[in-house]
Image: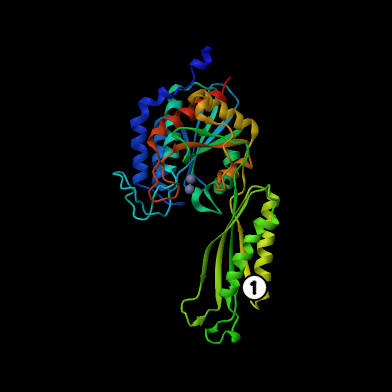
């Protein structure tokens, strides 16, 4: 091992910070804040960063903040991102540090993501073994859907005010072994769109259906017809999901209602597939409703785009992980998932990589009231971010 490699951050270098990191993570966990309400979390992050000598800019795209540290004469610039918001879920872990806010919970592990990046911030400021500029992006409102924190920070001039050559982010992953890394280049997470369909019939007495247009019949027929979109309209070698997640109509056995409403979640990994899904869903809703004498209105909303990891940056991030935890701890071709992430927006502007870090095989799934971030991976994430910076920002 040459001199330079010996100077790079090792897992053991962060072991002294384990107590601070788990206390910080548990504090954030006890005090979760919903999207657009992350004032206290952002304040805590900003205070720590300033204490450690980072230059901090607050209020970017809402409660977003960026910490910047420039060392040496290097010209390269790297951005690392963590998300800060929690979810409207009532916690059921029974942990002593469970959420103190009824109905609000860090059920996606953003408390852990924020803490790992803080761990790297402290270590980087102390060791300063790099030459160039680091921007730490603490983002609000990842869970918000359209108009999310990433979009707002970008609209607020993130990349102009804090120029970077590449941006990296991670998400913890239940079901992946503790501290294992998962990488994939190209499309890595799906685009996520929503359709809200209202089927307009003509309500009336349940005993005289001939005088009505029954929107429940239309809805039933449409649910079945929608299953043909993926199976009959999409290339079998492409991936797509059409899920009817909500269906509401009527309230009494003897009344045919005026309307029925449906809400759909639609996932895809390819822009052409994405367009085709929208086209077919609109056409089927309209034609099915008309076929039964009713009408459909379709409110189709495009959500987060496909998250596409760039090849070189992904290979680099993977290499750094293999150095840190050994090749056996790295899944080089982690399969794409049909979840979505607003990190996708950053990758539309800069090359970079979003990857997975194992939260443990027995971890409850994300967005579940029994989920908890695994504190064992806090030092791994912090050491990884540190080493990624040290390897990226070399003279
Ligand atoms: Zn989430
Ligand atoms: Zn998340």
Q: Residue 89, how many percent across, how many down? A: 40, 54
- What's the colour scheme? rainbow
Within the image, what quadrant is residue 210 found in?
Answer: bottom right
Q: Residue 176, how many percent across, how many down? A: 48, 38
Furthest residue to the top? 2
Residue depicted at x 65% and y 62%: 281
Question: Tag 1: Cα neighbours inside 10 Å, few (<14), some, or many (≥20)?
Answer: many
Q: Is mark 1 within 8 Å of ligand 1?
A: no
Left or right relative to 272: residue 18:
left
Q: Kindly state the secondary structure of the residue where label 1 is placed.
A: helix
The reply to whether residue 62 is in sight is no
The reply to whether residue 294 is in sight is yes
Quarter the C terminus occupies: top right
Residue depicted at x 34% and y 46%: 30
The residue wearing badge 1 is 289
Q: Residue 243, how many percent across, how many down? A: 57, 58
Marker count (numbered): 1
The correct choice, above or below, for 192 with respect to 173 in the image is below
Residue depicted at x 64% and y 47%: 269
Q: Residue 384, how many percent across, how many down? A: 48, 29
The correct choice, above or below, for 296 with respect to 74 in the image is below
Furthest residue to the left? 96
Residue sitting nearer the eye, 263 or 105: 263
Residue sitting nearer the eye, 218 or 314: 218
């Amino acid at each position: 091992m040459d001199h330079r490699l010996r100077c790079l951050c090792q897992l053991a270098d962060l072991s002294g910070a384990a107590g601070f990191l788990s206390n910080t993570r548990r504090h954030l966990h006890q005090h979760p804040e919903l999207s657009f309400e992350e004032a206290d979390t952002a304040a805590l992050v900003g205070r720590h960063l300033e204490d450690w000598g980072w230059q901090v800019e607050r209020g970017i795209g809402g409660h977003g903040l960026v910490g910047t540290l420039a060392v040496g004469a290097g010209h390269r610039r790297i951005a690392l991102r963590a998300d800060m918001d929690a979810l409207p879920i009532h916690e059921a872990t029974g942990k002593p540090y469970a959420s103190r806010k009824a109905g609000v919970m860090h059920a996606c592990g953003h408390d852990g993501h924020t803490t790992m990046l803080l761990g790297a911030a402290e270590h980087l400021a102390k060791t300063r073994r790099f030459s160039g500029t680091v921007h730490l992006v603490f983002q609000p409102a990842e869970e918000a859907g359209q108009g999310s924190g990433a979009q707002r920070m970008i609209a607020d001039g993130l990349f102009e005010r804090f120029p970077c050559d590449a941006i990296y982010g991670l998400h913890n992953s239940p079901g992946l072994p503790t501290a294992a890394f998962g990488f994939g280049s190209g499309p890595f997470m799906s685009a996520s769109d929503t359709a809200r369909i209202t089927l307009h019939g003509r309500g009336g007495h349940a005993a005289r259906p001939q005088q009505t247009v029954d929107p429940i019949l239309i809805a039933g027929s449409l649910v079945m017809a929608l299953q043909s979109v993926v199976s009959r309209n999409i290339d079998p070698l492409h991936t797509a999901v059409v899920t009817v997640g909500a269906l509401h109509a009527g309230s009494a056995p003897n009344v045919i209602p005026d309307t029925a409403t449906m809400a759909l979640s639609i996932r895809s990994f390819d822009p052409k597939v994405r367009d085709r899904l929208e086209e077919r869903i609109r056409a089927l809703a309209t034609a099915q409703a008309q076929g039964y004498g009713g009408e459909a209105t379709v409110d189709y909303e495009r959500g987060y785009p496909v998250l596409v990891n760039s090849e070189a940056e992904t290979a680099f991030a993977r290499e750094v992980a293999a150095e840190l935890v050994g090749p056996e701890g790295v899944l080089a071709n982690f399969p794409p998932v049909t979840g979505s992430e607003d990190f996708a927006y950053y990758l539309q502007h800069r090359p970079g990589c979003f990857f997975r870090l194992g939260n443990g095989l027995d971890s409850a799934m994300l967005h579940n009231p029994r989920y908890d971030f695994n504190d064992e991976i806090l030092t791994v994430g912090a050491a990884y971010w540190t080493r990624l910076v040290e390897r990226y920002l070399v003279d």
